[in-house]
């Protein structure tokens, strides 16, 4: 029995069961317009990359769903189902959560992991802890520009919820800066990217 959670442009997500545990099956869907052989190579690459980054992040102490199974023929990833609430539903006035988010991103970035799709939709809050999902666009980089861009994505998704969440953003930034290598420089770089975008 599988229940469709999300039918995205990139992946189909089902809720299912694995050995009695609630699980999520993430299947990468091919984009019809691309060359078929190239398409399946890209799908496999993303599936592998997502699994590798989820696992690496977990080893760094950043909460992620456990990988239960991976099938590189069908490009399916079977993940532990994280039952909780999306960060976007509970971030308002939640300073403790903002601290957790800032600290976790610092851990990822300190290890050179760029999430690639940091949004308030890709963070699930379980027992007060921030669980990060959706690493399919992640990559390794030590560039300040890449780290700042990762953070700017999250900032935009937060402020898109409600423009008055500035204070929550400041807390995320503060705890990121406290814990990240070159944290203050990276935070300053966010403003540079924003300025650049305004003049374009
Ligand atoms: N391990 C998981 N536990 C619970 N829900 C999940 C899990 N993985 C994905 N989801 C749900 O499915 C949605 C889409 O999954 P995601 O990995 O973010 O794929 P997409 O690339 O389509 O955004 C998530 O926003 C979340 O609601
Ligand atoms: Mg997502």
Image (cartoon, rainbow, N blue to C red):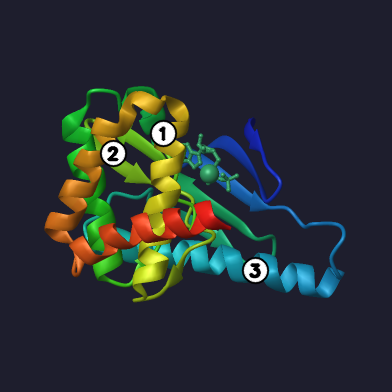
Residue in front for this viewpoint, 105 or 199: 199
Residue at image point 23% right, 61% down: 107
Q: Is residue 41 at all visible to an observer of this figure?
A: yes
Q: Is residue 124 above or below residue 66?
A: above
Q: Quick one: which residue is furthest to the front in this view?
A: 199
Q: Is the residue under label 2 in contact with that under label 1 (CB below 8 Å)?
A: yes
Q: CA distance from mark 1 to mark 3?
A: 34 Å
Nearest to N terminus: mark 1 or mark 3: 3
Residue 39 quadrant: bottom right
Q: CA distance from mark 1 to mark 2?
A: 8 Å
Q: Is residue 125 above or below residue 35?
A: above
Mark 1 surroundings: few (<14), some (14-19) or many (≥20) residues within 10 A: some
Residue at image point 37% right, 53% down: 151
Q: Which residue is mark 3?
A: 44
Residue in front for this viewpoint, 16 or 103: 103
Left or right of 108? Residue 117 is right
Q: Is residue 130 above or below residue 46?
A: above
Residue in front for this viewpoint, 94 or 131: 94
Ligand 1 within 8 Å, label 3 CB: no
Which numbered tag is attached to residue 159? 1
Q: Is residue 54 at all visible to an observer of this figure?
A: no
Give the x, y percent position of residue 34: 84, 65
* Quarter of the figure that contains the N terminus: top right
Which numbered tag is attached to residue 169? 2
């Amino acid at each position: 029995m599988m229940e469709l959670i999300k039918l995205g442009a990139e992946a189909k997500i089902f809720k299912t069961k694995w050995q009695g545990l609630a699980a999520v099956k993430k299947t990468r869907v091919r984009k019809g317009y691309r060359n078929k052989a190239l398409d399946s190579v890209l799908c496999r690459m993303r599936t592998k990359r997502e699994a590798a980054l989820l696992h690496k992040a977990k080893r760094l102490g950043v909460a992620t769903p456990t990988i239960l199974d991976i099938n590189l023929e069908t490009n399916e990833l079977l993940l532990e189902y994280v039952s909780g609430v999306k960060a976007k539903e509970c971030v308002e006035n939640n300073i403790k959560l903002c601290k957790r988010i800032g600290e976790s991103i610092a851990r990822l970035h300190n290890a050179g992991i760029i999430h690639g799709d940091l949004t308030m939709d890709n963070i699930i809050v379980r027992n007060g802890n921030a669980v990060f999902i959706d690493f399919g666009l992640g990559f390794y980089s030590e560039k300040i520009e890449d780290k700042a861009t990762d953070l700017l994505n999250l900032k935009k998704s937060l402020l898109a919820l409600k423009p008055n969440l500035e204070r929550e953003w400041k807390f995320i930034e503060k705890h990121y800066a406290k814990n990240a290598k070159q944290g203050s420089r990276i935070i300053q770089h966010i403003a540079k990217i924003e300025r650049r975008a305004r003049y374009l």
